[in-house]
Image (cartoon, rainbow, N blue to C red):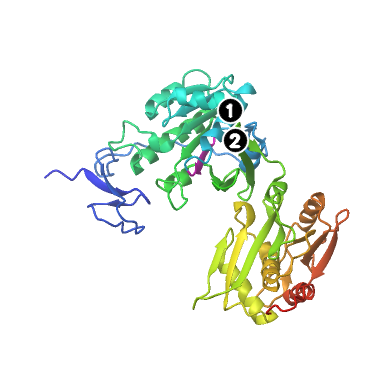
Amino acid sequence: MARNSTKFVCQNCGAQHVRWSGRCDNCGEWNTLVEEDAASAPVSGSQRKARPGRPVALSALSGEEDQPPRVSSQVLELDRVCGGGLVRGSALLVGGDPGIGKSTLLLQAAAGLANAGRKVVYVSGEEAIDQVRLRATRLGLARSNVGLAAETNVENILATLETGTPADLVVIDSIQTLWTDSIESAPGTVSQVRASAQMLIRHAKRSGSAVVLVGHVTKDGQIAGPRVVEHMVDAVLYFEGDGAHQFRLLRAVKNRFGPTDEIGVFEMSDMGLREVPNPSALFLGERDAWAPGAAVFAGMEGTRPILVEIQALVAPSTLATPRRAVVGWDSNRLSMILAVLDAHCGLKLGAQDVYLNVAGGLRIVEPAADLAVAAALVSSMARSALQPDAVYFGEISLSGAIRPVGHEATRLKEAAKLGFTQAIAPGAGTGGQDGEGLRTRRVDSLSTLVAAIAANAPKREGEDT
C-alpha cells in the first residue's frame, strides 16, 4: 500500500499534522493548516544510506579582525540599527505593515550604495520593473545604477546573482512571493518560505553578499510565515509607524552583529524617507507645555537619548470598573504605579478613569519612565501643570522609593541641549553632573514628588476638590 504523500502544515507556527483539522494543536490558531506535498521531503535513514563525512578545519577564537567586515548603506539610521553597517555575507529580515515604507527605505539604501560604486541588485516579486522605476523617479533616484529584476523563482534569482562579480547588496521584496522547483506547494506556504530563505542565505554566506529579505506582517504585528525564518537570518528589523504621524521607527529585535536596543528614526515626506538626527525635537515639537498631566521623560533607546512627552488624564469614573487605557507603555506597570500612589502617597485612584499616552506614537519599555508617568498622573489629578522646563526620569520601587537608572549624564546632556533647565532625578544618582544651565533636583521617595506637585496646585474658589 502506498504511503500518504501529503501533510498538513500550520502557516502560523510550521507544525506538521497527518490530517486536517480546524485548529492547530501546537499554536492554537484556527484555519491555518494547509495541505502540502511531502514527496520532496528527505527520506529516513533506513531508506537511504548516509555518505561518509569529511573532516573540517578548526579555527581559533582569536582572529585578525576584531569586527566583522561591514559596508555602509549610506543611510546612517539604518547603519545605526544594524550596528555600524551591513555585514558582508549576512542575511537580514525586514518586516513592517503594508505601506509603512519598507520598499522606499530599501530602495533609498540600494541607490545610496550604488552611488558609492557598489554593485546592488533589487529583485521585486510583488511589483513590475516599471512600478519600481516610477518610485525611483519620484524619489529622485532614477540615475542610480541599481540592477532591477521582477522574478519569483529562486533558481532564476540565484542564477542571475551568480553571473559576474558578486553583488554587495541583494534586496528581495518579498520572501513570501518566492517559490522553488524543489517544493511542490504554493508560494507563501511554510515549506516554500523556509526553502527559499535557506537557499538565499546559503548564497549570502558563499558569495559574501549582504541579502535583505522583506517580510509581510500579520495583524498581530509579527512577521508572517514560520518562525524558523527569523532563526535562520542574522538580523530581524521591524519598521514601525503610525498612520497619524509622519515619522517611522526602525527597530532591531535580533542582531548577531550588533545591539538590539538601537532605533532609527525617519520622517516620511513627499521625497521619501528623511533621516531625523534629533528625534527629541521631533517628539516635542507640538507640546503644550502648560497643560496639566504632561511630563517630559528623558529616556534612552540604545545609546541614543530621546526626550518624549508622557500625557496622563485622571477623571472621575461613572462605571463600576474604572477604565485603564494605555498607549505606548506597559499596562501592568501602570497598575503598579497606581498601587504605589494609593498605598504610600494617599492618592485614591481606584474610582478614577486613567488614560496614559506616549506622545508621537513611540513605545517605551524602559523602567526609568516610572517617575515621569507618576508626575503626569499626579499633575492631572491635582490639575496643576508641571514646570515646562523640567525633565523626569527614575524607577519607582514597590516601597515608593526612587531607584537610580543608568546613563544619567547622557540624559542630562540631551535635556540641556534642548533648552531644559532642570531635571528631577533619583536621589542616589550614578555620578552624572549637571549640564550647562541645568540643575538637578534629587528625590528619594515618590511621596516627596507628590507633595511638591500638590504644593504648587492652584486654589480655585468655588470649585469642588
**Number of residues whose C-alpha sits closer than 10 Å to that of mark 2, classed few (under 14), some (14–19) or many (20 or more):** many
Above or below for 246 versus 424: above
**Number of residues whose C-alpha sits closer than 10 Å to that of mark 1, classed few (under 14), some (14–19) or many (20 or more):** some
Magenta segment boundaries in residue numbering: 89-97
Horizontal side of 391 relative to 354 (left or right) equals right
Above or below for 380 versus 327: below
Q: Name the residue tied to disc 2.
A: 87
Determine the image quadrant of residue 395. Answer: bottom right
465 and 186: which one is in front?
Answer: 465
Q: Residue at x 59, y 31 (%)?
A: 109
Residue 139 is labelled as 1
The residue type indicated by label 1 comes to Leu
- Name the element at disc 2: strand
- Of all residues, the one furthest to the left in this rendering is 1
Marks 2 and 1: in contact by CB < 8 Å?
A: no
- Name the element at disc 1: loop
Q: Please provide percent x and percent y for residue 455.
A: 79, 75
- Nearer the camera: disc 1 or disc 2: 1
Determine the image quadrant of residue 420. Answer: bottom right
* Quadrant assignment for the N terminus: top left
Q: Residue at x 60, y 64 (%)?
A: 356
332 and 226: which one is in front?
Answer: 332
Task: Estimate the spatial distance between the alpha carbons at disc 1 and disc 2, rounded to whole Å.
Answer: 26 Å
Q: Earlier in the sequence, mark 1 or mark 2?
A: 2
Residue 421 is labelled as none
Q: Please provide percent x and percent y for residue 203.
A: 47, 30
The residue type indicated by label 2 comes to Val
Q: Please provide percent x and percent y for residue 130.
A: 46, 22
Q: Is residue 85 visible?
A: no
Q: Magenta span: helix, strand or loop, mainly?
A: strand
